[in-house]
Image: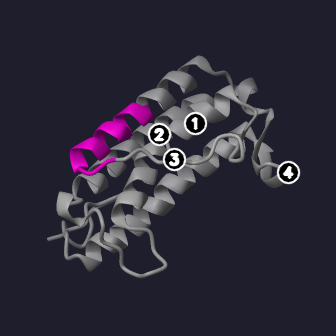
Amino acid sequence: MNLIKNFLKELESEAQITKKMLSRIPDDKFGWKPHVKSMDIKTLATHIAELPGWVGMTLNTDGLDFAVHPYSPPDVSKTSALLELLETSLEDARTNLAKAEDKDLIPDWTLRTGDMIHFVSSKEDMIRMTLSQIIHHRAQLGVYLRLLNIPIPGSYGPSADEAN
């Protein structure tokens, strides 16, 4: 089985859906959030757009330590900038996957904050989790858009807004 080939195929499929979803965000709604405990659209959408970049980071490092590299999201304020960020992240993922071999997915990868280890998993599992995070957060964004009365694009078939 060629895991890298499968990851590339899945990345491309999810990229198309993600582009459609991010493109629906109106520039004037970046500060909106459905609940006080929820992320605003800007934070959520930026995270979705940058997540493909975690594929290359996973393949090229043995982990991420937030104590050494604090998280600082890119500052975007327009949908066009979100789509550019997504494309940059996707290109990085494609490039790094194209250079990888299945054996590169075996080593462990660790997420930590200093001495606190959040989790350790194989690089394969970390890439799987990254793709799952894109899907998960994209679904959250779908709820946000629905609450704003913005038509939802279909993901794996037509949405209720596209069905006739």
Do we see residue 31 in this rendering?
Answer: yes
Q: Disc 3, disc 4: CB below 8 Å? A: no
Region rendered in magenta: 76-90
* Circle 2 SS class: helix
Residue designated by label 1: 55
Among the two numbered marks 3 and 4 on one chain, the one whose residue lies closer to the N terminus: 3
Give amino acid for label 1: Val
Q: Residues within 10 Å of mark 4 (few under 14, many from 20)?
A: few
Give amino acid for label 4: Asp
Residue ranking furthest to the bottom: 35
* Circle 1 SS class: helix
Give amino acid for label 2: Leu
Among the two numbered marks 3 and 1 on one chain, the one whose residue lies closer to the N terminus: 1
Residue designated by label 2: 11
CA separation, marks 2 and 4?
32 Å
- Residue 33 picture location, percent across and down: 35, 74
Residue placed at 24% from the left, 73% from the top?
160
The residue mark sitting in front, 1 or 4, is: 4
CA separation, marks 1 and 4?
24 Å
Q: Disc 2, disc 1: CB below 8 Å? A: yes
Among the two numbered marks 2 and 3 on one chain, the one whose residue lies closer to the N terminus: 2
Q: Is residue 155 left or right of residue 130?
A: left
Residue designated by label 4: 115
CA separation, marks 3 and 4?
20 Å
Residue placed at 70% from the left, 40% from the top?
68
Residue 140, placed above or below residue 77: below
Looking at the image, which is closer to me, 66 or 50? 66
Do we see residue 156 in this rendering?
Answer: no
Residue 134, placed above or below residue 33: above
Residue designated by label 3: 72
